[in-house]
Image (cartoon, rainbow, N blue to C red):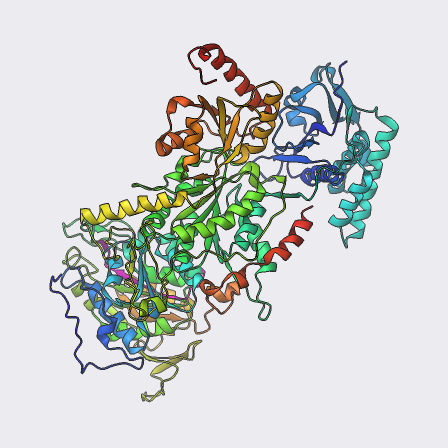
């Protein structure tokens, strides 16, 4: 970490996006994480993605649980409201927040301890419900803040910094997300911003539950040989199935592709996902096949990354509940209170 | 043999097997008496089970409007062989036992000091119906018919009730009317008259007959709740179910048909309270309904809502604890668990409704208080109020009153240059200003956390910041005293040195007991506590009496503990009287307990204590 304060003045020549903000306007406080932490790269990717998407920073609500990853929402989008909730329970708080105001963009940030260990139940249920959100798991296989215990995503046989082997079967959050009905599932690597930023773009544009499992090495406790979540290991075993080019609905698509090289997916909001195939046979709209594919490669020790699954016709919780279009938190007594005349009728029916 | 003779003042208890359709038949008897203008107070005493276990339904007929449980049974309708001996034992001397004599009853299993009324219900049913389910269901209606004759219940009232119940189902209506008639005719031709009678009166007035959970749900509708997150748990589930039922009618946008609220059945209580906290943080009025085990699970989040200062409403329909305890019995045993829920130094606002009317009123009020105080507020109902239909004042609503959304800083205020510190005590009442997420592009954003922070919501581990914040929270709790409902005093007819304090569902039994004691020359002032934190009125009340009996439906005297700890009252002036077997406290229990203690106190203290 650094103790130097960020300069408050922005350079006048910094480029502005369509809503008039520079990239610096999407930054937050100085990170207090360790130098080289994968999580800081993810924060940078979120900053870049939001700036590029022309999202007004205050229209994003950032929610997290407890842990190193959950501290990061303080380090990006400093003008947004954030909520550092309790350990493993961010999904429920995010669900409630989303119910209160469907117009904001909800960004859930969590870690592997937070989502796969203590919070596995809420992780599963928030996906079942189809809450419209982008849920980023900063997955390093280890408890950082309590100094290096294994988490539930640590691979069987992987070694701790002290050389102790993990005996428990790992939980693969991307696979679990597929099973639980997430309508957008991706996996990425904090060291591959080119891959990660378009995935965040697409996840934010996705009108349903979007999960990005980002392998994010812990420089302090899980970056040694014998670890399967180290920079070196992930670089060697990363098998990207596709490369995503994201086009917001307003953008004209100008990129040229060779025949048979791409899959095009148009989402509910008319944004277009163009996936350059790296594995010729991979179809990211086939959920069942995606699950098998991830498992086949995991058995070979490979970490499959890219956009694993997307349902372009996703239905979110508000649609299922048939709630009104206006945010519920804007309604007043005129819309909510049936009034004394109706109460008289109710009284009469109870006599 | 002695024979209990009473008009409009007796208790009938029905002993049944659950899942046999008895509850609706028994309720029919209660409602028909009510329609005759005579107050009734029914109580369902049921098992944690769906079919096959014993269940009881007790109907107190009470012209004087005493709605508490009286204690004792004047007539037992014994339909359950499993509980026969126990049921027969409960009947008062000179009382009545009504039973199905299709099979002969051994004399040894009855009593000589009660009047036994046999009616061959099974035989009559088997002769009339061939379908097994009909034989079961109509057996219940047959005894309703017989009771109507024995007690002089106007059959046209039952017929009217049938008409409403089976509107559009003419076949069912006819079958029920037929069964009722068979029962009545058999009774008229074969049974001897009894001493219990119902006579038409005009004592119900405009009162309504409703259960507390329905009332609490309606209070949340009127109070503007837009998010309800819940997890099923007895005895609170019907709060959320009633909220769903009401909002499907009352919260529909007329143009689009869309809902003006969201209800989510969560995967557990951790998630339900988490959703409420998230919605409250984001400016929606949100509540959950639960019971003791749910409160235990929610405790971590309750602490977060307290410390991060997020409006949260919890309707706790209390049951018997600890652990799974007595899920279908009533207690007031979560007082301390709720007052201090969560680790660290926490204190929460509690409201104590006495009946469905106050369940409605206080649930709506809790939504205001939670936003005004930016903190969790508990409505402390219980099974006795929540799941039993109770006669109470009609619900009332003042259309001119706006919701109190508390201190919310707007975009305009931020633009005007207001200094925004999320935890800054601007007004000196301990209550800070908050902004809703998304309010302003560059101002008013902050990071909410359960860790310590300074007045501007910045992370801080500095001791001074922590202490300042905790002191402000204390000031806020002090402010709460001026906002929560005041206690209600019932003054004795003559100056009294003894007094009682009580709360919640104890209320009707207490008022009845006070009348009974007054008839015996024992006069007590009575104070019904309606909220925590305690106001000075409560402290002064205790100080003005030499002894104050605190009546509680828990073992430990939890409100007494809270009075001593939080109001600083002299422990020696309090005498805790507890009733905690899971049944609702009775007027007879209270009367006896006070009479005994007053007698003892007078013997020992008259000379020394001249206050009398």
Occupied quadrant, residue A101: bottom left
Q: Is residue A142 magenta?
A: yes
Residue B25 percent across, percent down from the top left: 72, 39
* Residue B462 visible (yes or no): yes
Q: What's the residue at 16%, 55% (across, down)?
A: A221
Q: Is residue A105 magenta?
A: no
Residue A175 percent across, percent down from the top left: 36, 61
Q: Is residue B153 left or right of residue B456?
A: right
Classify the position of the N terminus of chain A by image quarter: bottom left
Q: Is residue B14 above or below residue A4?
A: above
Q: Is residue A241 left or right of residue B334?
A: left
Q: Is residue B201 left or right of residue A56?
A: right
Q: Is residue B398 above or below residue B342?
A: below
Q: Nearer the viewer, residue A124 or A81?
A: A81
Q: Nearer the viewer, residue A61 or A307?
A: A61
Chief SS of the magenta region? strand
Q: Is residue A58 left or right of residue B538?
A: left
Occupied quadrant, residue B96: top right
* Residue B266 visible (yes or no): no
Residue A42 percent across, percent down from the top left: 24, 67
Q: Nearer the viewer, residue B410 or B416?
A: B416
Which stretch is magenta?
A129-143
Q: What's the residue at 24%, 50% (across, down)?
A: B452
Residue B563 percent across, percent down from the top left: 40, 31
Q: Is residue A262 above or below residue A225?
A: below
């Amino acid at each position: 970490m650094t103790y130097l304060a960020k300069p408050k003045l922005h350079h006048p020549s910094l480029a502005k996006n369509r809503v008039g903000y520079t990239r610096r306007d999407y930054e937050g406080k100085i990170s207090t994480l360790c130098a080289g932490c994968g999580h800081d790269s993810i924060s940078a990717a979120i900053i870049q993605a939001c700036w590029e998407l022309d999202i007004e920073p205050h229209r994003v609500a950032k929610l997290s649980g407890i842990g190193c990853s959950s501290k990061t929402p303080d380090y990006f989008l400093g003008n947004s409201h954030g909520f550092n909730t309790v350990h493993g329970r961010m999904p429920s708080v995010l669900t409630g927040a989303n119910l209160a105001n469907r117009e904001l963009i909800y960004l859930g940030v969590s870690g592997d301890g937070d989502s796969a260990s203590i919070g596995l139940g809420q992780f599963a249920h928030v996906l079942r419900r189809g809450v419209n959100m982008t849920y980023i798991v900063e997955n390093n296989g280890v408890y950082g803040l309590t100094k290096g215990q294994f988490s539930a995503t640590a691979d069987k046989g992987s070694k701790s910094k002290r050389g102790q082997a993990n005996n428990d079967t790992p939980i693969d959050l991307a696979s679990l997300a597929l099973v639980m009905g997430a309508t957008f599932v991706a996996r990425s690597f904090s060291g591959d911003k080119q891959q990660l930023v378009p995935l965040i773009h697409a996840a934010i544009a996705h009108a349903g539950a979007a999960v990005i499992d980002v392998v994010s090495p812990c420089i302090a406790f899980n970056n040694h040989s014998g670890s399967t979540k180290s920079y070196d290991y992930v670089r060697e075993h990363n098998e990207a199935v596709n490369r995503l080019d994201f086009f917001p609905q307003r953008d004209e698509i100008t990129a040229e592709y060779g025949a048979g090289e791409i899959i095009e997916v148009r989402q509910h909001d008319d944004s277009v996902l163009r996936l350059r195939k790296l594995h010729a046979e991979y179809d990211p709209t086939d959920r069942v096949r995606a699950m098998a594919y991830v498992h086949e490669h995991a058995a070979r020790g490979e970490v499959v990354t890219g956009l694993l699954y997307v349902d372009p016709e996703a239905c979110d919780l508000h649609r299922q509940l048939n709630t009104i279009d206006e945010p519920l938190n804007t309604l007043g007594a005129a819309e909510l209170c049936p009034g004394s005349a109706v109460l008289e009728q109710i009284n009469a029916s109870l006599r | 043999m002695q024979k209990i003779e009473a008009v409009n003042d007796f208790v009938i208890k029905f002993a049944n097997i659950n899942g046999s359709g008895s509850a609706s038949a028994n309720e029919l008897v209660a409602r028909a008496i009510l329609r005759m203008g005579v107050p009734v107070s029914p109580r369902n005493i049921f098992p944690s089970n769906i079919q096959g276990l014993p269940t009881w339904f007790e109907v107190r007929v009470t012209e004087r409007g005493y709605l508490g449980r009286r204690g004792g049974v004047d007539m037992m309708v014994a339909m359950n062989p499993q509980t026969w001996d126990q049921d027969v034992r409960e009947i008062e001397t000179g009382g009545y036992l009504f039973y199905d004599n299709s099979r002969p009853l051994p004399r040894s299993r009855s009593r000589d000091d009660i009047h036994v009324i046999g009616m061959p219900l099974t035989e009559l049913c088997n002769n009339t119906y061939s379908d097994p389910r009909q034989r079961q269901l109509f057996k219940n209606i047959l005894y309703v018919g017989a009771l109507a004759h024995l007690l002089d219940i106007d059959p046209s009232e039952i017929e009217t009730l049938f008409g409403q119940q089976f509107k559009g189902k003419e076949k069912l209506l006819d079958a029920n009317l037929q069964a009722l008639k068979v029962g009545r005719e058999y009774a008229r031709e074969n049974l001897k008259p009894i001493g219990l009678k119902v006579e038409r009166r005009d004592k119900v007035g405009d009162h309504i007959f409703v259960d507390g959970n329905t009332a609490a749900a309606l209070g949340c509708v009127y109070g503007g709740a837009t998010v309800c997150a819940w997890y099923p748990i007895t005895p609170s589930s019907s709060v959320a179910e009633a909220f769903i039922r009401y909002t499907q009618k009352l919260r529909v946008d007329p143009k689009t048909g869309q809902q003006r609220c969201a209800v989510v059945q969560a995967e557990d209580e951790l998630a339900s309270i988490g959703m409420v906290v998230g919605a409250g943080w984001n400016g929606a009025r949100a509540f959950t309904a639960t019971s003791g085990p749910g409160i235990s699970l929610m405790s971590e989040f309750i602490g977060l809502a307290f410390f991060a200062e997020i409006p949260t409403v919890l309707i706790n329909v209390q049951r018997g604890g600890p652990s799974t305890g007595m899920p279908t019995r009533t207690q007031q045993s979560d007082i301390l668990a709720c007052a201090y829920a969560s680790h660290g130094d926490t204190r929460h606002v509690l409201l104590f409704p006495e009946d469905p009317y106050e369940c409605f009123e206080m649930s709506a009020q809790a939504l205001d208080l939670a936003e005004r105080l930016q903190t969790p507020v508990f409505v402390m109902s219980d099974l006795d109020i929540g799941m039993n239909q109770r006669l109470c004042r009609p619900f009332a609503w003042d259309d001119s009153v706006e919701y109190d959304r508390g201190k919310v800083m707007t975009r305009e205020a931020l633009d005007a240059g207001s200094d925004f510190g999320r935890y800054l005590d601007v007004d000196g009442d301990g209550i800070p200003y908050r902004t809703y997420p998304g309010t302003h592009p560059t101002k008013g954003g902050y990071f909410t956390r359960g860790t310590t922070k300074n007045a501007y919501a910045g992370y801080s581990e500095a001791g001074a910041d922590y202490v300042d914040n905790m002191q402000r929270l204390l000031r806020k709790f002090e402010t709460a005293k001026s906002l929560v409902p005041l206690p209600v005093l019932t003054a004795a007819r003559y100056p009294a040195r003894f007094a009682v304090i009580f709360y919640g569902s104890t209320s009707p039994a207490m008022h009845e007991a006070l009348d009974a004691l007054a008839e015996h020359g024992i006069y007590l002032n009575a104070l019904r506590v309606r909220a925590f934190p305690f106001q000075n009125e409560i402290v002064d009340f205790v100080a003005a009496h030499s002894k104050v009996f605190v009546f509680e439906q828990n073992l430990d005297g939890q409100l007494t503990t809270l009075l001593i700890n939080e109001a600083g009252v002299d422990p020696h002036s309090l005498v805790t009287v507890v009733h905690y077997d899971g049944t609702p406290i009775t007027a007879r229990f209270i009367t006896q307990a006070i009479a005994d203690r007053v007698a003892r106190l007078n013997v020992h203290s008259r000379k020394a204590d001249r206050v009398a």
